[in-house]
Amino acid sequence: MNPNLITLLPAVAEALAAGTPVVALESTIISHGLPYPQNVELATEVEAIVRANGATPATIAVIDGQCLVGLSPQQLERLASEQGVVKATTRDLPWLLASKRTGATTVASTMKLASMVGIKVFATGGIGGVHRGAATSFDISADLTEMAVTPVAVISAGVKSILDIRLTLERLETLGVPVVVNGSDDFPSFYSRTSGLPAPRRLDGPAALAQMMWSAWTDLGLTCGISIANPIPVEHEIPAAEIATFIDEALADLDAKGITGQDVTPFLLKRVVEGTGGRSLVANLALVRNNAATAAQVAVEYAILRRVELR
Ligand code: PSU
Ligand code: MN
């Protein structure tokens, strides 16, 4: 691999060299997951939350064909507001580099670039998964296959019920990806702390989660990622039954408009926000903030384990 491929923001380079905690953040949530200007406001706030919890934030994107780990405020603003930013999963990275275009990274491609520079913890809102109707559409997010091969812990609020949650968990099991819920016996469904499905495994708090990462990668030598589901704080929760109506409407609209491929997830996210009159947006912002704080705490605990090992 080309060691000069990735440009690190100076603060990120310093933290990685010193072995202090770093948290990766994705950029598709900025360009395609949230409306402007809430997207850039959240991206900025999330970086501050990571710092307040003792870690260095590293938002990841490709700008004009350059892989960037850590963005300046001007670069964040560009991703949030510019037209024509490409939604880029891992398979889109070579094309972005060769054509010198600007792309926002999904969970999959953010994991890939984070892992290449040695970042082990990544915070996001929701991960991609198996879409409803995947038996005929074959629409299964590349986020799942990346998790099978890239050793990064992804902290999300679970899986949104625009997806088939049960099948997503089945797929993660087949791919050998550990799935653990932080502090709950239920698997969360993004807006809701429950999904009707049990937590595949449960651990309580950042120290235990960091220990699991250590067990996976150092003790066992596994090479896969880890999915950490962090339930939305109870005061921001929207009950699953309430959100279901809006998700069904969005799915019906998707079919009616014949939208397929990588446009599916952004379309559904946008329609749910419109359907709920912005209520889902408030919950979405709250859960991302919560995941950023938890991720930073996990990164702090993981850095402690690493330091003990070096002694
Ligand atoms: N789910 C959300 N918000 C998002 C995404 C998913 O609640 O912004 C984004 C993430 O970047 C995720 C991507 O990696 O959508 C998955 O897209 P697809 O289903 O096309 O793989
Ligand atoms: Mn898809």
Image: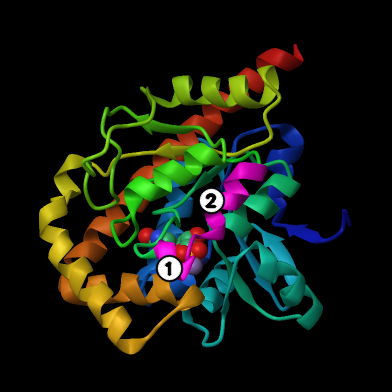
The kind of residue tagged 2 is Leu
Determine whether 86 is above or below 21 in the image: below
Is residue 143 highlighted in magenta? yes
The residue singled out by tag 1 in the image is 136
Q: Residue 103 appears at what percent x and percent y?
A: 62, 74
Q: How many marks?
A: 2
Give the CA distance from mark 2 to mark 1: 18 Å
Q: Residue at x 26, y 33 (%)?
A: 186
**Range of the magenta residues?**
134-149
Q: Residue 172 appears at what percent x and percent y?
A: 49, 42
Q: Residue at x 54, y 55 (%)?
A: 143
Q: Residue at x 45, y 70 (%)?
A: 137
Residue 310 appears in which quarter of the rendering? Answer: top right
Q: Which mark is residue 144?
A: 2
Front one among 141 and 188:
141
Mark 1 neighbour density, 10 Å: few (under 14) some (14–19) many (20 or more) = few
Task: Compare marks 2 and 1 and give the one earlier in the sequence.
Answer: 1
Front one among 300 and 233:
233
Residue 195 seen:
yes
Q: Residue 229 appears at what percent x and percent y?
A: 38, 39
Front one among 304 and 84:
84
